[in-house]
Amino acid sequence: MGILTRLSYMWQQFINHGGNPLVFWRRPTWSVDQIPDHSDKAVLITRGNSGTGYATALALYNAGANVTIACRSLVRAQEAAEDIKKNGDRGTWGVRYIERAPGDESKVGSIHILISIEHATKEYER
């Protein structure tokens, strides 16, 4: 890699991380308040009863989405759904849980967004 390529790469990193090459140490910030309106969207979140799945379910519920959390434990799913309803501020569509027996191919409806927490957490395991 030549010196010009390296300098170009470093310059791009400065721009991408701070927006201004003179303040490259600043990182862009993001918050759940920036999630756009998800009204009329159906979202299925696996492992939505705790951790990252719960936080994602709560954020999308507050964005107006019809959130369905898929969990192995019906009790934990019910607790998470009630907690999300209690802590959510939009709640126009609600939160549901799925009780599904092995081999049961019941339909939930059309899904606009599928979030699999398992794959996201495996990528960032320590």
Image (cartoon, grey):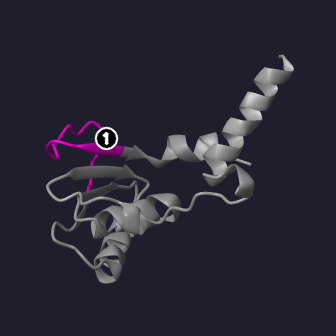
Is 12 positioned to the left or the right of 57 in the image? Answer: right
Q: Is residue 103 magenta?
A: yes
Q: Secondary structure at mark 1?
A: loop
Compared with 119, 33 (above or below) is below
Is 72 positioned to the left or the right of 103 in the image? Answer: right
Quadrant of the frame with the N terminus: top right
Name the residue: 36% across, 78% down. Answer: 83
Is 112 positioned to the left or the right of 114 in the image? Answer: left
Instruction: Classify 10 Å Cα crowding around label 1: few (below 14), some (14-19), many (20 and above).
Output: few
Name the residue: 80% across, 22% down. Answer: 4
Compared with 102, 86 (above or below) is below
Quarter residue 102 falls in: top left
State the residue in front, 104 or 62: 62
Q: Which residues are magenta?
A: 97-114
Q: Is residue 57 magenta?
A: no
Name the residue: 27% across, 57% down. Answer: 68
Kindly identify the amino acid type of the residue bearing the numbered disc 1.
Answer: Pro
Principal SS element in the magenta part?
Answer: loop
Disc 1 target residue: 102
Q: Position of residue 11 (x, y in %)?
A: 72, 38
Q: Residue furthest right?
A: 3
Compared with 19, 74 (above or below) is below
